[in-house]
């Protein structure tokens, strides 16, 4: 019980009723909170999956990290067998630019080993 003074009058109130109301509100709002969290998680996953599933973006990241084994794996998974297949990858120019700017020789050698004499005509 709580004593509350209003305009000189003392009133006795039970906090229990307020706590019950707050508990009910918390239960109801928690359901909405879970829905909002799920929506935010879904939106984040959509953004990540668009990057994760884009071979061109992966190629740029791998080239920037000088991950020549990863580049080779990606080109195999993307079924890149010819220079035309390589040219069709989004982000190829950016990937090669990253190799050039970072002087990643192993990554460059990966492209040269795959495409032999045609490496001058990649872009």
Image (tube, rainbow, N blue to C red):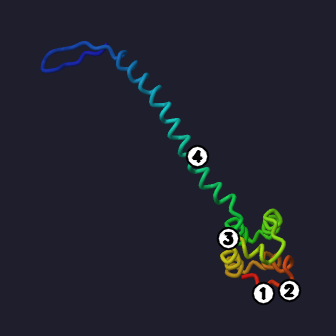
Q: Which residue is mark 2?
A: 117
Marks 2/1: CA–CA distance: 7 Å
Q: Which residue is mark 4?
A: 42
Q: Residue at x 17, y 20 (%)?
A: 6
Q: How far from the left and from the top, in percent, is residue 98?
A: 68, 76
Marks 4/1: CA–CA distance: 43 Å
Disc 1 element: helix
Disc 4 element: helix
Mark 3 or mark 2, which has the lower sequence index? 3
Would you say the residues marked 3 and 4 are in contact, meaning their CB atoms lie under 8 Å apart?
no
Mark 2 or mark 4, which has the lower sequence index? 4
Q: Which mark is residue 120?
A: 1
Marks 3/2: CA–CA distance: 22 Å
Disc 3 element: loop
- Give the left or right position of residue 6, taking residue 88 as reference: left
Would you say the residues marked 3 and 1 are in contact, meaning their CB atoms lie under 8 Å apart?
no
Q: Residue at x 80, y 68 (%)?
A: 75
**Residue nearest the observer in this picture, 11 or 68:** 68
Q: Residues within 10 Å of mark 3 (few under 14, many from 20)?
A: some
């Amino acid at each position: 019980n709580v004593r509350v003074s209003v305009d000189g009058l003392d009133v006795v109130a039970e906090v229990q009723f307020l706590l019950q109301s707050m508990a009910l509100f918390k239960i109801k709002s928690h359901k909405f909170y879970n829905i909002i969290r799920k929506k935010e998680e879904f939106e984040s996953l959509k953004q990540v999956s668009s990057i994760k599933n884009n071979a061109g973006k992966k190629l740029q990241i791998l080239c920037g990290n000088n991950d020549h084994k990863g580049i080779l794996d990606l080109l195999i998974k993307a079924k890149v067998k010819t220079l035309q297949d390589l040219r069709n990858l989004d982000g190829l120019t950016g990937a090669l630019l990253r190799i050039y700017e970072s002087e990643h020789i192993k990554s460059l050698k990966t492209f040269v080993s795959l495409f032999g004499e045609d490496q001058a005509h990649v872009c």
